[in-house]
Amino acid sequence: MNIGIIGAGRFGKLLAEQLENDNKIFLFDKLDDKDELESCNLVIYAVPNSLLQDVINETKEFIQSDAIVMDVGSVKIKPCAVLQEAFGENILGTHPLFGPDSASDSWEGHKMVFCKLNIPDDQYNKVKELFISRGVKAIECSPEEHDKMMAKTQALVHYIGRALSGIKEQEISTPDYANLLRMMEKVTHDTWELFYDMQNLNPYAKLEREKFSKNIAELEEKINQELDK
């Protein structure tokens, strides 16, 4: 396939490296050569969710009407709606549950979510097989199902990890403390832009943060009640 990857950040470059073996890759950064998109039969938007609409507005006219278009963002309801409004057909939403830190050498065994939108089965299966052939395990769900689950398993994890910022390795520590350090270090490798997108664009993220904050408050209350005994 001729694959156009719009967005030359860390993940866009990872996509290019892993997909170039048997495909022709066009990696777009500043969109100076947008006319090259006309030769692409698969276009992947690898840009922050918050920028997706603006980047589509800049590039849509150069994309062939029969090209497959997808995104790889960590939120799915809003980006999928943007794709549907902009292109109408031959579209799907995806979310690779890995990144440059966890899968720089191989995608073998890593999970990737596929949200089938308005796209023929043969085209959809072609894209899915492209990633499965690299070792990816495909998970199919709706954008709503994705965002509900990711509010817990990603947005909340990144929220807790960012809150741990500042903790350092200690000579006297437990294995659990080392696990906290690893979580903090891993999430802080990602950009603040990604963090804000997953918190503000996922409609279920705020509810999970509120539940967590309530649990913290209740735990503090229990500690103080025990102290007062």
Image: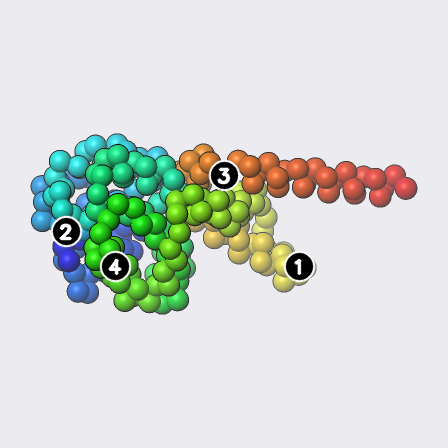
Left or right: where 87 falls relative to 224: left
Nearest the camera: 62 or 81?
81
Residue pointed to by mark 4: 125
Under mark 2, the amino acid is Asn
Residue 126 seen = yes
Q: Upstream in the sequence, badge 1 or badge 4?
A: 4
Question: Which residue does the image show at 53% across and 35% down from the upper left?
Answer: 206
Q: Secondary structure at mark 4?
A: helix
Marks 1, 4: nearer the viewer: 4
Q: Secondary structure at mark 1?
A: loop
Q: Secondary structure at mark 3?
A: loop
Under mark 4, the amino acid is Asn
Under mark 3, the amino acid is Tyr
Tell me the distance, in whole angstroms, between the alpha carbons under discs 1 and 2. Answer: 53 Å
Residue 204 has which mark? 3
Tell me the distance, in whole angstroms, between the alpha carbons under discs 4 and 2. Answer: 14 Å
Residue that extends furthest to the right in the rendered view of this protein: 229
Residue pointed to by mark 1: 173
